[in-house]
Amino acid sequence: MPLYLRCVVCRQLNSEELVATRSSPNHSLFEPLAVLNLRDHIEEKLRAAILRGIFKPGDHLVETTIAEQLGVSRAPVREALSALERAGLVVCIPRRGYFGIDFTEKDIDEIYSLRLLLELGALRRAVERITEEDLDELQHLVDRLGKSAQRMEAPEETVELDLSFHGLICKLADHARLLSYWDNLRAQAQLLVGVTTKTHYNHPEEPGRLHQEILDAIRERDLPRAEQLLIAHMMDAQRRALAALRSLHAAEEAE
């Protein structure tokens, strides 16, 4: 058979095989979704455990133990821990493994000062662009935040709603790079807010009231007032985070 005819036949056979593979119930072009997302599932479980305080700052996250408890191999656990390191929730010490991040006072200063820079910039842009629909969405978050904080039953929910409010303002700024930087900071901010929400809010009505005041200023397009309230809120949050850190270290030294 001439060469060009053999090529035509081969192409036809390959095409027929592909069609047969697609139509056959015994063949799949894709791996099961659960397999593809295994690392993501492990990362989500570990992230939740860290943010809920199951893993404390400085705790050793042992790959083999985690793999055994989850019934998986060590490889996806290692990949998940690497992703959490990039998110700033764990640190990797060579030849020792992964450990829960133990914040220093310098870490707290850097996180809150960077949050303030990003969120002030976002606030200025958001006030110019915000719609009534956006304001309603922010109000819904504040209402849920206030109720969650008053119940004091689910601090993780309160923290998530708190950061969702700030994250939405960053989103409304319509600035992709600013939002990306804020998203990268969110996990560490969530860990800090979680500690201070559980231990250093003096009154359960504070979270709802503080965020309602910021929202009221935004609704009135009173940018100077909104900036003043945001700065005060961030400075107070930083102060409470430092107090929580010092209390934690004092308790550790007393043991």
Image (cartoon, helix red, strand yellow):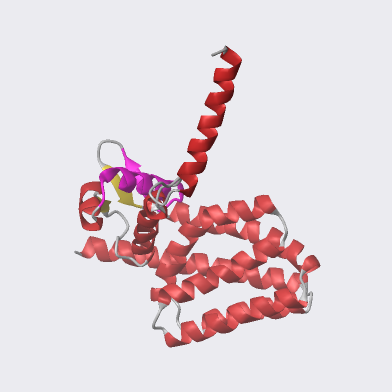
Residue pictured at 56% horizontal, 69% vertical? 164
What residue is at 60 percent from the left and 65 percent from the top?
Answer: 167
Q: Horizontal and vertical percent for residue 104?
A: 40, 53
Considering depth in this image, is 153 or 245 the residue closer to the camera? Answer: 153
Badge count: 0
Q: Which residues are magenta?
A: 72-93
Q: Is residue 97 above or below residue 213?
A: above
Q: Is residue 48 visible?
A: yes
Is residue 10 found left or right of 42 in the rendered image? Answer: right
- Residue 229, image x and y in percent? 66, 73
Q: Residue furthest top?
A: 2
Say above or below: 100 vs 127. above
Q: Which quadrant of the figure contains the C terminus?
A: bottom left
Whether 3 is among the magenta residues is no
Rendering coords of residue 176 (x, y %) = 68, 52
Give the residue at x 38% y 57%: 41
Query: Horizontal placement of 202 versus 216: left or right?
Result: left
Is residue 102 at least partly visible in the picture?
no
Quarter of the figure with the N terminus: top right
As drawn, the residue found furthest toward the front would be: 1
Is residue 70 or residue 92 the one in the foreground? Answer: 70
152 displayed left or right of 222: left
**Quick one: 23 or 79, which is closer to the camera?**
23
Place residue 154 in its image quadrant: bottom left
